């Protein structure tokens, strides 16, 4: 094997993703590659779709993993659903919502944003006022804002949209597999996630799901989807039906990995998985406060899988992260945008969310500080 690969260290991944990978997922990745039209492979694809529906808590027939990272899922939702001139409202309280606004504006939409302070959640009342002022074809929000550690009120926003024609796009890249995501109950029309956060797969796949209403908008478009690779009206012919049609070569082994990662979640039980995230988050917060440090986000808006810690006076952001990486083989995340240099981001995602990892990190951080 190439010597650069031989020498890769095992790093405890406690940043904003990728997260630690379970041994059986690594084994799945190295299984023999099948042809992408092979009937045995198609059975694997069907098993993935079924487990994704369970995890998204949806009956949506169009539920598939896109080839690409979480951002490809974001692009998929917007490129399939936006038509030139559509009014799009994005609720912004972090980097990923800013990215949503960028993606939507490149597609010729009229994009409005409502900005909320980073580290605080979206406020439904302000959204309600905006929705009363103007008709929007699409509203986009991030469920778990990984840049700040805030959980946004996905259900409350769905209540504001009930009975309207506005399509609801929700980013669940970091929430899926770590906290409940209830696509049908919340009336979400298009949702996407990513393989390398709480699903604990390597980066490279982005599960998406579209409601019947979203599919209708896609089918009634005046113009073709302006992106060949991500056009769901074509991709569905590969992922569905008795006879499958080639679109692009599926990343076969990556899909083995996702199949196994989803199976691990199902075997442990979704509720147990969510509970494990919550417990380890609570243990981390207790330890952090025990070290005299503070969490950025107020308790009721915190995500269990992404913990933003305020960097204490006198500690050097970069040298602490470097020491953790070099001496303890632990990766944590830096702050982004207005929070750069102000917070560390500690991920407890998927296979990372285990007691021994919380202990190892608290020990290492205590000694480093
Ligand atoms: C990580 C992340 C993305 C982007 O995913 P990539 O895999 O980096 O493309 C989008 N949204 C959120 C909330 C994320 O955490």
Image (cartoon, rainbow, N blue to C red):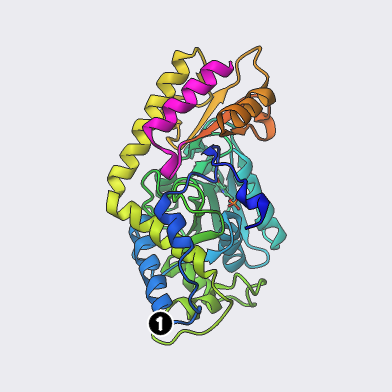
Identify the residue shown where x is 63% and y is 23%: 320
Q: Position of residue 57 (x, y in %)?
A: 34, 57
Relative to 26, 334 lies left or right: right
Residue identifier under label 1: 39
Q: Is residue 280 above or below residue 55?
A: above
- Magenta stretch holds residue 357: yes
With respect to residue 8, does 119 lie above or below?
above
Residue at image location 65% in from the left, 75% down from the top:
228
Residue 34 covered by magenta stretch: no
Can the viewer see residue 189?
A: no
Provide the secondary structure element on which disc 1 rests.
Answer: helix
Nearer to the camera, 264 or 242: 264
Which quadrant would residue 106 be assigned to in this image?
bottom right
Above or below, 267 against 358 in this view is: below
Residue 72, percent across and down? 60, 60
Answer yes or no: is residue 292 visible. Answer: yes
Mark 1 closeness class: few <14, some 14–19, many ≥20 residues within 10 Å: few
Residue ID at (49%, 27%):
361
Magenta: main secondary structure equals helix
Residue nearest the observer in this picture, 191 or 353: 353
Look at the image and give the residue range highlighted in magenta. Answer: 348-369
Q: Which residue is at the far bottom?
A: 243
Tell me: is circle 1 under 8 Å from ligand 1.
no
Q: Quadrant of the C terminus?
A: top right
Position of the N terminus, as image quadrant, is bottom right
Taking the image as shown, residue 6 lies to the left or right of residue 61, namely right
Total labels: the figure holds: 1
Location of residue 281 by image quarter: top left
- Horizontal and vertical percent position of residue 22: 42, 49
Residue 251 x %, y %: 54, 69
């Amino acid at each position: 094997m190439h010597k650069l690969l031989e020498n890769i260290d095992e790093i405890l991944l406690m940043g904003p993703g990728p997260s630690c990978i379970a041994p059986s997922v690594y084994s799945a990745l190295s299984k023999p590659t099948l042809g992408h039209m092979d009937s045995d492979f198609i059975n694997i694809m069907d098993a993935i779709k079924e487990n994704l529906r369970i995890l998204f808590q949806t009956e949506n027939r169009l539920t598939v993993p896109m080839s690409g990272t979480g951002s490809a899922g974001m692009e998929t939702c917007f490129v399939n659903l936006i038509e030139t001139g559509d009014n799009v409202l994005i609720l912004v309280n972090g980097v990923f919502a800013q990215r949503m606004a960028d993606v939507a504006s490149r597609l010729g939409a009229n994009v409005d944003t409502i900005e909320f302070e980073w580290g605080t959640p979206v406020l439904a009342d302000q959204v309600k006022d905006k929705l009363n002022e103007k008709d929007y074809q699409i509203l986009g929000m991030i469920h778990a804002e990984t840049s700040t550690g805030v959980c946004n009120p996905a259900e409350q926003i769905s209540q504001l949209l009930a009975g309207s024609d506005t399509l609801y796009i929700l980013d669940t890249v970091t929430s899926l597999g770590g906290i409940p995501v209830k696509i049908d109950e919340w009336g979400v029309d298009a949702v996407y996630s990513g393989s390398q956060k709480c699903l604990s797969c390597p980066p490279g796949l982005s599960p998406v799901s579209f409601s019947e209403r979203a599919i209708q908008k896609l089918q009634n478009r005046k113009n073709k989807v302006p992106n060949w690779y991500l056009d769901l009206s074509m991709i569905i012919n590969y992922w569905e039906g008795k006879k499958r049609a080639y679109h692009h070569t599926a990343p076969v082994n990556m899909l083995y990995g996702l199949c196994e990662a989803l199976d691990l979640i199902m075997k442990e039980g979704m509720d147990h998985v969510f509970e494990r995230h919550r417990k380890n988050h609570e243990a981390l917060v207790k330890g952090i406060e025990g070290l005299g440090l503070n969490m950025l986000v107020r308790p009721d808006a915190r995500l269990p899988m992404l913990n933003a810690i305020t960097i204490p006076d006198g500690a050097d952001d970069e040298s602490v992260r470097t020491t953790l990486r070099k001496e303890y083989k632990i990766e944590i995340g830096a702050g982004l945008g207005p929070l750069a240099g102000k917070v560390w981001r500690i991920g407890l995602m998927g296979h990372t969310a285990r007691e021994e990892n919380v202990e190892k990190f608290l020990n290492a951080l205590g000694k480093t500080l």
